[in-house]
Image (cartoon, rainbow, N blue to C red):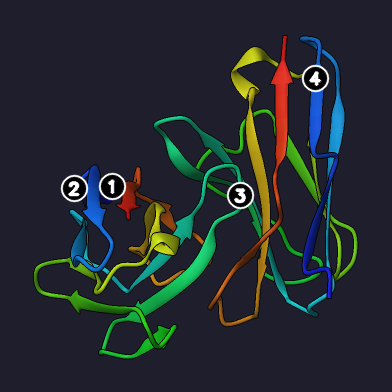
Amino acid sequence: NAGVTQTPKFQVLKTGQSMTLQCAQDMNHNSMYWYRQDPGMGLRLIYYSASEGTTDKGEVPNGYNVSRLNKREFSLRLESAAPSQTSVYFCASSTRSGTEAFFGQGTRLTVV
Amino acid sequence: QQPVQSPQAVILREGEDAVINCSSSKALYSVHWYRQKHGEAPVFLMILLKGGEQKGHEKISASFNEKKQQSSLYLTASQLSYSGTYFCGTDNAGNNRKLIWGLGTSLAVNP
């Protein structure tokens, strides 16, 4: 079992460029999440999807869009990257009841 | 709204005990505990639910005081593998998919 797989692992963008972070899980989980983690800030929820076909804003959604493509995949898009979006991004998934969450290995994004 | 974790950092010798606290200014429906090692993803430890139910690993213990709006994680007979940063995530609204996370407690266990 791969669990939660994120791609890419590292990315450098120039200000204004766009990109999509991919996330896929093979655990048949209903809920999926995108977090960002900054030094000294802990984890902050960007968006989540409680089930296929639904998405909701988290704590820091501005500058991001998401797509729940199917039950397995949940992508995060930066339309116009800004230096403030430099961070480590984690995708996670959990069962419908929102119990134990499994995290991907993270994407380290630098915007210059 | 962000829960406050204490202490910020702790250093132990192998075999010693530690307590990590997580306090919220709002009523808690549940508290979720995770450990993250440097450069790795967070890993689940425990969920404590309003009403007393707990779900987690057998070797980890924790408490949840609804009245005081806080939770404590108890690490006993610490091992080198316990080193890492411990985060609590709190559900203040009955939506355990929308957690608010503390800033973490850094734990180092030395031989």
Q: Quadrant of residue A12?
A: top right
Query: Which residue is rendered at x = 63% and y = 35% of the image?
Result: A88
Q: CA distance from mark 2 to mark 4?
A: 35 Å
Q: Judge whether B9 appears above or below A112 on screen.
A: below
Q: Is residue A79 visible?
A: no
Query: Which residue is rendered at x = 21% and y = 68% of the image?
Result: B72
Observer-nearest of A27 and B95: A27
Which residue type carries mark 4? Val
Look at the numbered disc 4 and give the secondary structure of its residue. strand
Q: Judge whether A86 appears above or below A71 on screen.
A: above
Observer-nearest of A73 and A26: A26
Which residue type carries mark 1? Gln
> Label 4, on which residue?
A12
Which residue type carries mark 3? Glu
Dot 4: few (<14), some (14–19), or many (≥20) neighbours within 10 Å? few
> Label 1, on which residue?
B1
Left or right for A75, reference A102: right
Q: Is residue A14 visible?
A: yes
